[in-house]
Image (cartoon, rainbow, N blue to C red):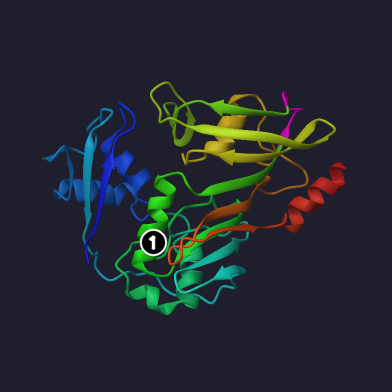
Amino acid sequence: MTAHYNLIADISGARLDKFVGDSCPELSRTRAQKLIAGGFITVNGRPAKPGHQLSVGDRISVSIPPESPSPLAPEDIPLKIVYEDADLLVVDKPPGLAVHPAPGHPSHTLVNAVLGYLPSLADDDFVRPGIVHRLDKDTSGLIIVAKNRPAHENLSDQFKARSVAKSYTVLVKGRLSPESGVIEAAIGRDPRNRQRMAVVAKGREARTEYRVLKYYKDYSLLEIRPRTGRTHQIRVHLAAIGFPVVGDAAYGVPSPQLSRQFLHASRLSFSLPSTGQYVEFTSPLPPDLDQALKELG
């Protein structure tokens, strides 16, 4: 079964393959490039190259045909399931578990765990079965997994419409003032290091709201609400204003107490695909983050 997406570019200068990869959760940038080369992705009704630079308002048509049988294997990895119905799971992901296979971690991911729990998802033609949105490998907390295609499409539409509310609990270095505010700065690939993201003039629009929950000496515990979903958005925005995430090896500051970033997806709200009921789920801080606060306290 071929999936179809109709996208509209919201920024000028973005590469077609990057924009499509960011907009379609089941597509990697590499597969987007293959689909572009095969004519499955067009801009304003015409074929384009992967590096084609988009203009605001460009209409991108994406057709995703089934791939050859997936090499993904089910694995018996415990899942902490916060909620389940016929359409979806809400999972409390532990730190250290990548969401989907990628170079460097081809197995032992959330996708492998979900396939172990729901073997029927292996019959789907998604490259990343069930995955609607992402969390970084070392970010813990709540993530939605779709159990069927209609639910996946419904949830993807909610994310595109920005009607899904996500909150993160984050510890940063420094006493952030004022105690609440908004960070608005475009994010794109760091021109000096393509493996990182950065605030760049020609990046994609990004908006992050924050509120200080508590001060700990020279640290601030924050509630963060990202209003857009750019790669590494929270970490990049906080580093850009001079309040880096504690324990973040890429953008933040090291921590003697932590082996990963202090970033936890603590609250998630959305509408159930089957009924439209608006639901909210919460997750307490995991033990490593809770202990870090106690040592600061």
Q: Is residue 40 above or below residue 123?
A: above
Point 22% across, 38% down: residue: 59
User: For the residue labelled by badge 1, is the local secondary structure a helix, a strand or a loop?
Assistant: helix
| Residue 84 shows in this picture | yes
Residue at the left extreme of this rendering: 46
Image quarter of the C terminus: top right
Image quarter of the N terminus: bottom left
Residue 237 rendering spot, x and y as whole percentages: 57, 31
Q: Is residue 200 left or right of residue 39?
A: right
Front one among 269 and 189: 269
Residue 217 rendering spot, x and y as whole percentages: 85, 32
The residue stretch that appears in magenta: 172-178
* Residue position for label 1: 152
| Residue 250 shows in this picture | no
Point 38% across, 52% down: residue: 157
Q: Quadrant of residue 10?
A: top left
Alpha-carbon neighbours of circle 1 within 10 Å: few (<14), some, or many (≥20)? many
